[in-house]
Amino acid sequence: MATDSHGSDHSAGDDGRQHVFDDPKNVKRLMRTFYAICIGVFALDLVNLVQGWMGAHELRHAERTWEGLPGFYAFYGFVGCVFLVLVAKVMRTFLMRDEDYYDR
């Protein structure tokens, strides 16, 4: 393993080259960008809410009242992902095979 000037270990690929996400600075930069995009999308959702209060045409056409709540789709997506992870953990108990399953 290679170490940088700060003494932290960086794992290299099979060909010995260091990849983009081996550097923690790049990972931190990517996460900050992701968070900024999430905040921006939520801010646009709040703009839609303010437009509705002002009587302007809303950007979304919600069929249910709770769909018009700010951040509803972000919350709905998060709950959906958590649900999928929990279902996968339960399914793992009866779908999991031994490590040497195919070698027998």
Image (spheres, rainbow, N blue to C red):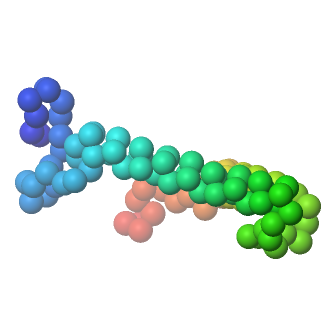
Quadrant of image for the N terminus: top left
Name the side, left or right, on which 94 lies relative to 49: left
Q: Position of residue 76 (x, y in %)?
A: 74, 56
Q: Of residues 16 and 99, which is closer to you in this image? A: 16
The answer to whether 63 is drawn above or below residue 66 in the figure is below
Q: Quadrant of the rendered structure where residue 99 is?
A: bottom left
| Residue positioned 14% across, 26% down in the render | 6
Q: Nearer the viewer, residue 101 or 43?
A: 43
| Residue shown at the point (63%, 51%) measured from the top left | 43
Residue 93 visible within the image? no
Q: Where is residue 28 in the image (x, y as percent from the top left)?
A: 35, 41
**Can you name the residue that lies furthest to the right here?**
65
Residue drawn at the location 73% of the way across and 60% of the way down: 48
The answer to which quarter of the image holds residue 84 is bottom right
Residue 77 in sight from this viewpoint: yes
Q: Where is residue 56 in the image (x, y as percent from the top left)?
A: 81, 66
Where 11 falls versus 97 (above or below)?
above
**Residue at image point 50% right, 54% down:** 37
As rendered, which of 77 and 55 lies closer to the eye? 55
Image position, residue 66 (x, y; %) = 88, 58
Q: How many labels does the image show?
A: 0
Compared across the picture, whether 20 is left or right of 30 comes to left
Q: In this view, does 100 lie to the left or right of 25?
A: right
Drawn side of residue 79 relative to residue 69, left or right: left
Position of the C terminus, as image quadrant, is bottom left
